[in-house]
Amino acid sequence: MIREKIVIIGGGFAGLQLAKQLNGKADKKVMVIDKVNHHMFQPLFYQVASGRIEPSNISFPFRKIFQRSKNIQFRMTEIKEIVPSENRIIADEGTFTYDKLIIATGCKTNFFGNQVMEDLTFGMKNTQEAISIRNHILLTFEKMIIEKSRTDDGNWNIVIVGSGATGVELAGAFAEMKREVLPRDYPHMNFDELKIILISSGAKPLEAMSVESQNKAEEYLLKLGVTFMTEERVTAYDGDVVFFESGKQIPSNNVIWAAGVTGNVISDFNKDNLIRNRYKVDRYNRILGYDNIFAIGDIAYMETAKFPQGHPQLANVAINQGKNLGKNLLKPNISNWKEFEYEDLGSMATIGKHRAVVDLPKFKFQGFFAWYFWMFLHLMLILSVRNKLAIFFNWMWSYFNKDSSLRLIIVPSNQNSTEQ
């Protein structure tokens, strides 16, 4: 039997869902390629960054996921070039050929071309970045207990740029950490000086959600003691001070950039066909100009009647595009392929304990019930039962004790010795 060779670049929500659709199909030889060896559940990165759950609880090794698969292989390497004329891709660790190629590389933090901001602030689009935020924030407090004279200049402020779901959830988590956890860890420090500052370019947080959710989210943030700065744009940062277009300045050594994302494009491939750094595709997710190269998830730009400006870069879009393309690839006749159509199932965000906002297609709700709804849905989306139980246990422990035991500072070392 001649098997069709399908290569999937990227193991995020879209790529993983596509691979699952093709799993066990004898006529398909599938290779998943990613520069890391695990799938990451990005919606809970903020909980890793704030020390609420371990990164291993939301990270799933590809080799474990495909351990029993007879037709799916995994390779850990980074793709450098695509050569469509030869059906070939060039990676750090070699060359791979394909019959069909699917690009599912997702997106990364968008620093809008500001290299200084990229070098000095923290993004949060992968496990390593989330761990780096946790390490840096905790190291700040350890330094402050020694350098107490520096606490008055505000350099330990936590500044979050961007008031979408990521920014809002981070702000809420750190505000609760300031209120419930840090005073017990550092009983001789005055945390009144610590400010959690959320920067928004608009008038309200969560601009993609309903007015009701925006207003409620702002109310929750203010109740938690978050300083919410509206209609402000960051222009520069030197590692110690954040500068704004309005002329304002905020001292801080802890700046997290959550102000947008941009596609993870591959080298110069099809660069003339990019729209906002996403590959333009047809209704079957084929990249325009190619019959055997596809893009799915955050990296794909598809115009439809419902979404004339492209789909939102959400996990649910990626999952459904992966499912649809997988089903299409299993049909022998392309005339039977189904166009992708996305039904918006709503959006949600949590802003601390018992505080969440949920927008569903037919109704909206906030508060206590919305928080439980958010928890349940995210728990159900976690891949393995073991991880579900681990996260549930951590959440329950935190719920009843208002604490977490996961505030470990683990930084890489170049030394082989364990001597202090």
Image: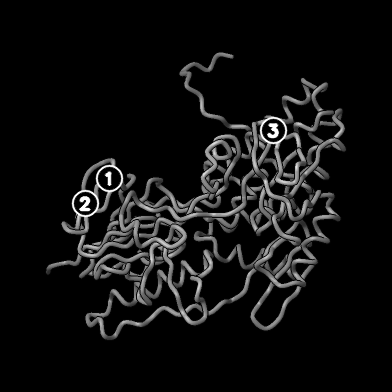
Where the N terminus falls, by quadrant? bottom left
Name which residue lies at 43% across and 61% down: 278
> Can you give x and y, in whole percent of width and height, for residue 254 in the image?
68, 37
Residue for point 27% across, 49% down = 81
Q: Residue 378: which quarter of the image?
A: bottom right
The answer to whether 361 appears left or right of 103 in the picture is: right
Looking at this rendering, what residue extends furthest in the left direction? 1
* Quarter of the figure that contains the C terminus: top right
Residue 334 placement: quadrant: bottom left
Kind of residue at disc 3: Asn
Q: Nearer the viewer, mark 2 or mark 3?
A: 3
Of 5 and 26, the residue lying toward us: 5
Q: Are marks 2 and 1 in contact (CB under 8 Å)?
A: yes
**Residue at mark 3:** 253
Furthest toward the bottom, the residue is 336
Disc 2/disc 3 C-alpha distance (Å): 44 Å
Residue 336 in picture, x, y percent from top left: 29, 85
Q: Residue at x 64, y 39 (%)?
A: 236
- Mark 2 nearby-residue class (10 Å; few <14, some 14–19, many ≥20): some
Residue marked by disc 1: 91
Residue wearing tag 2: 96
**Residue under the image location 27 percent in, 59 percent down:** 7
* Residue at disc 3, secondary structure: loop
